[in-house]
Image: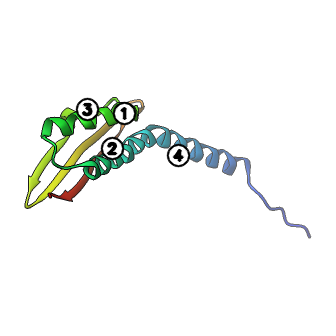
Amino acid sequence: MYRQKGFTLLTLIFLLALAVFAALVAMKTVPTYIDYFTVSQSLKNILAGGMDSSDAELRQTFDARMNVNSVYSITGRDLEISRDDGMLTLSVPISSKKPFAGGISLSVDLVATASAPLK
């Protein structure tokens, strides 16, 4: 006797709903992670370029890099600069809260950080 195999219609609908949910979450969160990786790489490049700059020059360089990379939600004012224990540390908090459905929101909080020893 032949036994049937495969999905039922209900299983197919459930899997499609799950795929749509995952796609919606990805569409809301991926841009924040792209900004995080862009900012993180920019901080590393700023430190590689020279650490003898003043805080104002570091902020201006950061603003220029964010402008080139089309990241407009983060500015030089968000840049936190510390020179402690012979280390220059640059960090930027990245926060995003996007409405998802109804009264539900997705919130992502990240901190991009880069450090290098002072010369």
Task: Say which mark, if any, is on residue 71.
Answer: 1
Q: Are marks 3 and 2 in contact (CB under 8 Å)?
A: no
Residue 18 x/y as whole percent: 57, 47
Give the CA distance from mark 1 to mark 3: 8 Å
Q: What's the residue type where badge 2 is placed?
A: Val
Q: Earlier in the sequence, mark 1 or mark 2?
A: 2
- The residue that disc 2 covers is 39
Q: Earlier in the sequence, mark 4 or mark 2?
A: 4
Q: Is residue 11 left or right of residue 66?
A: right
Task: Say which mark, if any, is on residue 75.
Answer: 3
Front residue of this view, candidates 102 and 44: 44
Give the CA distance from mark 1 to mark 2: 8 Å
Which of labels 3 and 4 is toward the front? 3
Q: Earlier in the sequence, mark 3 or mark 2?
A: 2
Q: Earlier in the sequence, mark 1 or mark 4?
A: 4
Front residue of this view, candidates 105 and 9: 105
Give the CA distance from mark 3 to mark 2: 10 Å
Q: Is residue 80 above or below residue 77?
A: below
Q: Is residue 69 above or below residue 116?
A: above
Residue 82 x/y as whole percent: 11, 49
Q: Residue furthest right?
A: 1
- The residue that disc 4 covers is 22
Residue 13 x/y as whole percent: 66, 44
Callout 1 crowding tier (Cα within 10 Å): few <14, some 14–19, many ≥20: some
Q: What's the residue type where badge 3 is placed?
A: Thr
Callout 2 crowding tier (Cα within 10 Å): few <14, some 14–19, many ≥20: many
Give the CA distance from mark 1 to mark 4: 25 Å
Callout 4 crowding tier (Cα within 10 Å): few <14, some 14–19, many ≥20: few
Element type where label 1 sits in the image: loop
Give the CA distance from mark 3 to mark 4: 31 Å
Give the CA distance from mark 4 to mark 2: 25 Å
